[in-house]
Every structure is written in C-alpha cells, then in structure tokens.
Amino acid sequence: MTFASPYTREQIIDALERQESESRVFWNKFDTNTFFRRIGQSWSPAETVRHLIKSTGPVGQALRVPKIVLRWKFGRATHDSRNYDELRMAYLKTLNEGGQAGRFAPSPRQESDLEAWRAKIMADFAKTHRVLRARAAKWSEKQLDHLQLPHPLLGPLTVREMLLFTLYHQKHHVSVVERHLNETRQS
C-alpha cells in the first residue's frame, strides 16, 4: 500500500479503509489450506489475521468509551502526537529490541471446518475495521491529540498515534507474511 503519510482524522480513516481493503485482497489470495498453514516457524496467515483482530479490536472498543472516562483512566496526552513515520520507526525499534505480541498473540485454537472458520475470521476482520473507522470518525481533531491510550510496547500514545500505529501495524504484518513466504520459497 502506497500513500502519503496520513495525519488528519479523515486521512487516517481513508488510509485505514484502503489498508483493510488491500489486506483483505492479500489474505484472500491464499487457498484455505495455505491460509491455515504456518510459514516455517512463523504464524500462518490465519493466525496473523487473528492477531490483527485481537490487537485492533480494543482500539475500537476504547474509542467507544466516554472521553471523560478515558481521561480519568489514562489521562491527558503528555506529548504532541507523532506522525506516521515517527510511530513506524518507534515500533520497529521496539521490535528490534525484542518486543513481541504478548497477550495479543493468536491462541493455538483450531476448528474442524476450515472453510467456515476462514469465513468467520475474515468477517471478524472486516467488522473490527469497520467499527474502528466508524468510532474514529466521531472524534474531533483536537480530541485525537488531547487524550491518550496505553500501548503494550510503546507506552502511552495519543489517540491519533494509536490510529496511526494501527494503520502501520496492518501494513507491517502483511509485509512480514510476504517476506516469510519469499524466504521459504528460496530455501
């Protein structure tokens, strides 16, 4: 996915929609058996999508909480919002230092009807992103920079930063799967 770095609420929402659409096309290229097959020691495409659902869902849920509650629970932003590239670099640095998915890793769960399970995973993926975009649209530009949310690896992020992180996180995992697939093909 190629785009100018988004920053405004509308740019972020548009970029999230494009990223979700392009990601869905990518995930749908896999036949069902490949979708559920691990790539070497790495997650399968299905596990990756489940990780993205598990990590994106709480952001959408947080955006539903009354802003006064978020302020009470997590406080006002303690820093100015960084841009997309700054967040991307901070995340990559954290990963290089050993950051991992932790509680957001997919469970080892397995269903017997893989076609039905795949359909459910992809429906959940679409719903999670639709909800996130709809809830983000209800925040003003000022509110995006005024309140913060906790990120398990990056610490407190403004709501704008959390949305930018979520956008990059999607792109990052598509790239990781592509890279791992290429590595296994070359082996």
Image (tube, rainbow, N blue to C red):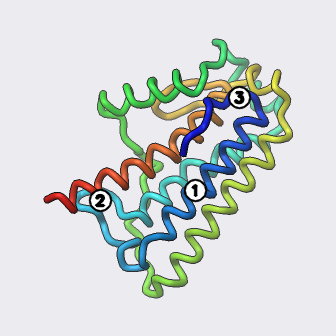
How far is mark 1 from mark 2, CA to CA? Answer: 18 Å
| 22, above or below 101, in the image | below
* Labels 1 and 2: the sequence-earlier one: 1
- Outermost residue on the top side: it is 79
Which residue, given by chain and number where applicable, does mark 1 sit on? 22
Question: Hey, which quadrant is residue 121 in on the image?
Answer: bottom right
**Kind of residue sitting beneath label 2:** Leu
| 33, above or below 5, in the image | below
Spot occupied by residue 126 in the image (x, y as percentages of width and height): 66, 62
Asked if residue 50 lies left or right of residue 72, the reply is left
Q: Is label 1 in a helix, a strand or a loop?
A: helix
Spot occupied by residue 62 in the image (x, y as percentages of width and height): 71, 41
* Labels 3 and 1: the sequence-earlier one: 1
Which residue, given by chain and number where applicable, does mark 2 sit on? 181
Which residue, given by chain and number where applicable, does mark 3 sit on? 73
Q: Is label 2 in a helix, a strand or a loop?
A: helix
Asked if residue 83 lies left or right of residue 174, the reply is right
Q: Residue at x 55, y 64 (%)?
A: 25
**Kind of residue sitting beneath label 3:** Lys
Asked if residue 145 lies left or right of residue 187, the reply is right
How far is mark 2 from mark 3, CA to CA? Answer: 42 Å
Spot occupied by residue 155 in the image (x, y as percentages of width and height): 52, 25
* Labels 2 and 3: the sequence-earlier one: 3
Spot occupied by residue 134 in the image (x, y as percentages of width and height): 80, 49
Label 3: few (<14), some (14–19) or many (≥20) C-alpha neighbours in 10 Å = few
**Kind of residue sitting beneath label 1:** Glu
Question: Hey, which quadrant is residue 8 in on the image?
Answer: top right
Foreground label between 3 and 1: 1
